[in-house]
Amino acid sequence: MLAARTIEILRTERGLGQRQLAARCTALGRPMSDTMLSRIELAKRRCDIDDLVAIAEALQVSPLALLQGPGAT
């Protein structure tokens, strides 16, 4: 899944661990554990629209950027 790979790339580019990004999502009102985020990045868990929006906001990109891939940010 393209979004999964993009999330991982953007997270690491920003120097964030999975736990840190999950905590940011939780602080934004979308409860997320580092395990959930790991499963999303590995495409082993479906990333629903609420997850996508929270992750995008936490990474300071648009949800569309996550769907289009790393070159779109």
Image: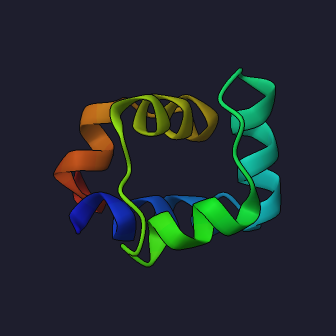
Q: Residue 71 at what x, y percent from top left?
A: 24, 58
| Left or right of 13, for residue 6 | left
Residue occupying image coordinates x 30% and y 60%:
70
Label tally: 0
Quadrant position of the N terminus in the picture? bottom left
Query: In the figure, residue 35 lies in which quadrant?
Result: bottom right
- Regarding residue 16, the answer to whether it shows in the image is no
Q: Residue 36 at what x, y percent from top left?
A: 62, 61
Q: Nearer the viewer, residue 41 or 36?
A: 36
- Regarding residue 57, the answer to whether it shows in the image is yes
Quadrant position of the C terminus in the picture? top left
* Render colour scheme: rainbow
Residue occupying image coordinates x 66% and y 57%:
14
Q: Residue 38 at what x, y percent from top left?
A: 59, 71
Q: Give the residue at the far top of this rendering.
A: 29
Query: In the figure, residue 3 lies in which quadrant?
Result: bottom left
Q: Residue 27 at what x, y percent from top left?
A: 81, 27
| Left or right of 70, for residue 40 | right
Q: Nearer the viewer, residue 9 or 34?
A: 34
Q: Give the residue at the far left of this rendering.
A: 68
Q: Nearer the viewer, residue 73 or 21?
A: 21
Q: Give the residue at the far front of this rendering.
A: 45
Residue occupying image coordinates x 36% and y 71%:
5
